[in-house]
Image (cartoon, rainbow, N blue to C red):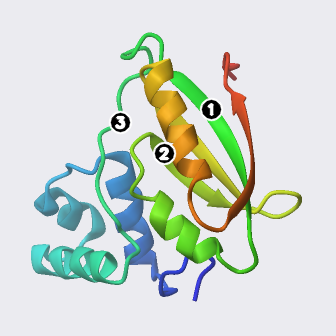
Amino acid sequence: MSNTGFIMTKFDSTDQKLISLLRSNARIPVVDIAKNLGVSRATVQNRIAKLEKTGVIVGYTVSLRSGTNENPIRAIMSLKADGRQEFKIANELKGFPGIISLYSTNGRWDMIANIETDTLESFNKILNSIRLVEGITATETSLLLDSYKF
Protein backbone atom coordinates (compact mmCIF):
# COMPACT_ATOMS: atom_id res chain seq x y z
CA MET A 1 0.00 0.00 0.00
CA SER A 2 1.06 3.55 -0.59
CA ASN A 3 1.15 6.07 2.22
CA THR A 4 -2.21 7.49 1.13
CA GLY A 5 -4.14 4.32 1.88
CA PHE A 6 -4.77 3.43 -1.76
CA ILE A 7 -3.49 0.42 -3.65
CA MET A 8 -0.08 1.12 -5.13
CA THR A 9 -0.25 0.85 -8.90
CA LYS A 10 2.72 0.48 -11.20
CA PHE A 11 2.58 2.80 -14.19
CA ASP A 12 4.05 2.15 -17.57
CA SER A 13 5.10 5.04 -19.80
CA THR A 14 1.66 5.17 -21.45
CA ASP A 15 -0.07 5.55 -18.07
CA GLN A 16 2.39 8.25 -17.08
CA LYS A 17 1.79 10.18 -20.32
CA LEU A 18 -1.98 9.72 -19.93
CA ILE A 19 -1.91 11.10 -16.38
CA SER A 20 0.26 13.99 -17.53
CA LEU A 21 -2.22 14.88 -20.29
CA LEU A 22 -5.16 14.73 -17.88
CA ARG A 23 -3.32 16.88 -15.34
CA SER A 24 -2.75 19.58 -17.92
CA ASN A 25 -6.33 19.38 -19.23
CA ALA A 26 -8.83 17.03 -17.56
CA ARG A 27 -11.35 17.80 -20.32
CA ILE A 28 -9.13 16.69 -23.19
CA PRO A 29 -11.19 14.46 -25.51
CA VAL A 30 -10.35 10.75 -25.38
CA VAL A 31 -9.72 10.76 -29.13
CA ASP A 32 -7.04 13.47 -28.68
CA ILE A 33 -5.40 11.48 -25.89
CA ALA A 34 -5.40 8.38 -28.10
CA LYS A 35 -3.75 10.28 -30.98
CA ASN A 36 -1.17 11.79 -28.64
CA LEU A 37 -0.31 8.41 -27.10
CA GLY A 38 -0.51 6.43 -30.34
CA VAL A 39 -3.10 4.00 -28.98
CA SER A 40 -6.76 3.29 -29.63
CA ARG A 41 -9.63 5.20 -28.05
CA ALA A 42 -10.74 1.99 -26.32
CA THR A 43 -7.26 1.59 -24.78
CA VAL A 44 -7.44 5.12 -23.36
CA GLN A 45 -10.94 4.53 -21.97
CA ASN A 46 -9.88 1.23 -20.39
CA ARG A 47 -6.77 2.76 -18.82
CA ILE A 48 -8.71 5.71 -17.41
CA ALA A 49 -11.32 3.32 -15.99
CA LYS A 50 -8.55 1.22 -14.38
CA LEU A 51 -6.87 4.31 -12.89
CA GLU A 52 -10.21 5.46 -11.47
CA LYS A 53 -11.10 2.00 -10.13
CA THR A 54 -7.75 1.58 -8.35
CA GLY A 55 -8.03 5.03 -6.78
CA VAL A 56 -5.15 6.60 -8.69
CA ILE A 57 -7.54 9.09 -10.27
CA VAL A 58 -9.93 10.20 -7.54
CA GLY A 59 -11.73 12.97 -9.39
CA TYR A 60 -11.58 15.81 -11.83
CA THR A 61 -11.54 19.47 -10.94
CA VAL A 62 -11.57 22.95 -12.36
CA SER A 63 -8.51 25.15 -11.99
CA LEU A 64 -9.20 28.85 -12.01
CA ARG A 65 -6.89 31.37 -13.59
CA SER A 66 -4.80 33.24 -11.06
CA GLY A 67 -6.63 36.38 -9.99
CA THR A 68 -10.12 35.01 -10.72
CA ASN A 69 -10.97 35.11 -7.04
CA GLU A 70 -9.46 38.44 -6.05
CA ASN A 71 -9.19 37.81 -2.31
CA PRO A 72 -9.10 34.12 -1.48
CA ILE A 73 -8.15 33.15 2.03
CA ARG A 74 -5.34 30.67 1.69
CA ALA A 75 -3.53 28.77 4.39
CA ILE A 76 -1.33 25.81 5.17
CA MET A 77 -2.42 23.73 8.15
CA SER A 78 0.07 21.35 9.74
CA LEU A 79 -1.55 18.34 11.44
CA LYS A 80 -0.30 15.90 14.05
CA ALA A 81 -1.99 12.48 13.97
CA ASP A 82 -2.49 10.18 16.93
CA GLY A 83 -0.72 6.88 16.40
CA ARG A 84 -1.35 5.22 13.08
CA GLN A 85 -4.59 7.00 12.23
CA GLU A 86 -3.17 8.99 9.32
CA PHE A 87 -5.00 6.95 6.64
CA LYS A 88 -8.34 7.30 8.44
CA ILE A 89 -7.80 11.02 8.90
CA ALA A 90 -6.80 11.50 5.26
CA ASN A 91 -9.91 9.66 4.06
CA GLU A 92 -12.11 11.85 6.24
CA LEU A 93 -10.40 15.12 5.25
CA LYS A 94 -10.51 14.49 1.50
CA GLY A 95 -14.22 15.28 1.54
CA PHE A 96 -13.85 18.62 3.32
CA PRO A 97 -14.70 21.63 1.15
CA GLY A 98 -11.85 24.10 1.19
CA ILE A 99 -9.08 21.51 1.45
CA ILE A 100 -7.57 21.68 -2.02
CA SER A 101 -4.71 19.27 -1.34
CA LEU A 102 -3.45 17.08 1.47
CA TYR A 103 0.09 15.80 1.96
CA SER A 104 1.74 13.22 4.15
CA THR A 105 5.06 14.48 5.46
CA ASN A 106 7.87 13.67 7.84
CA GLY A 107 9.30 15.64 10.72
CA ARG A 108 7.30 17.35 13.45
CA TRP A 109 3.99 17.19 11.54
CA ASP A 110 2.36 14.15 9.97
CA MET A 111 0.22 15.91 7.37
CA ILE A 112 -0.11 19.27 5.64
CA ALA A 113 -3.47 20.56 4.37
CA ASN A 114 -3.59 23.26 1.71
CA ILE A 115 -6.75 25.29 2.41
CA GLU A 116 -8.51 27.89 0.28
CA THR A 117 -11.85 29.59 0.87
CA ASP A 118 -13.66 32.83 0.08
CA THR A 119 -14.55 34.24 3.49
CA LEU A 120 -13.14 34.37 7.00
CA GLU A 121 -16.35 32.79 8.27
CA SER A 122 -15.97 29.73 6.04
CA PHE A 123 -12.23 29.61 6.82
CA ASN A 124 -13.04 29.51 10.54
CA LYS A 125 -15.61 26.73 10.00
CA ILE A 126 -13.09 24.64 8.07
CA LEU A 127 -10.43 25.03 10.76
CA ASN A 128 -12.88 24.13 13.53
CA SER A 129 -14.15 21.11 11.59
CA ILE A 130 -10.64 19.83 10.96
CA ARG A 131 -9.73 20.16 14.63
CA LEU A 132 -12.73 17.97 15.55
CA VAL A 133 -11.58 15.04 13.42
CA GLU A 134 -10.85 12.09 15.67
CA GLY A 135 -7.14 11.30 15.76
CA ILE A 136 -5.89 14.84 15.12
CA THR A 137 -3.95 15.80 18.23
CA ALA A 138 -2.44 19.16 17.22
CA THR A 139 -2.62 21.70 14.43
CA GLU A 140 -0.79 24.83 13.39
CA THR A 141 -2.17 27.10 10.69
CA SER A 142 -0.31 29.72 8.70
CA LEU A 143 -2.12 32.16 6.42
CA LEU A 144 -0.52 32.61 3.01
CA LEU A 145 -0.23 36.36 2.55
CA ASP A 146 1.56 36.68 -0.78
CA SER A 147 3.39 34.57 -3.31
CA TYR A 148 6.69 35.14 -5.02
CA LYS A 149 6.77 34.73 -8.77
CA PHE A 150 9.84 33.00 -10.17
For mark 2, what is the residue?
Answer: 99
Q: Quadrant of residue 150?
A: top right
Q: Secondary structure at mark 1?
A: strand
Answer with mark 3 or mark 1, whichever residue precedes in sequence.
Answer: 3
Q: Is residue 2 left or right of residue 84?
A: left
23 w.r.t. 117: above or below: below
79 w.r.t. 145: above or below: below
Amino acid type of the residue that numbered disc 1 sits on in the rendered structure: Ala
Answer with mark 1 or mark 2, whichever residue precedes in sequence.
Answer: 1
Residue in front for this viewpoint, 128 or 65: 128
Q: Position of residue 131 (x, y in %)?
A: 62, 50
Amino acid type of the residue that numbered disc 2 sits on in the rendered structure: Ile
97 w.r.t. 75: above or below: below
For mark 1, what is the residue?
Answer: 75
Q: Is residue 137 left or right of residue 129?
A: right
For mark 3, what is the residue?
Answer: 63
Q: Is residue 104 left or right of residue 38?
A: right
Residue in front for this viewpoint, 95 or 38: 95
Q: Is residue 60 left or right of residue 31?
A: right
Q: Secondary structure at mark 3?
A: loop
| Alpha carbon distance from label 3 to label 2 | 14 Å
Most extreme residue toward the top is 70
Most extreme residue toward the right is 108
Answer with mark 3 or mark 2, whichever residue precedes in sequence.
Answer: 3
Any mark on residue 20, and which? none
For image coordinates 82% across by 64% down, the residue present is: 106
How many labels sit on residues?
A: 3
Q: Position of residue 20 (x, y in %)?
A: 41, 58
Q: Nearer the viewer, mark 3 or mark 2?
A: 2
| Alpha carbon distance from label 1 to label 2 | 10 Å
Q: Nearer the viewer, mark 3 or mark 1?
A: 1
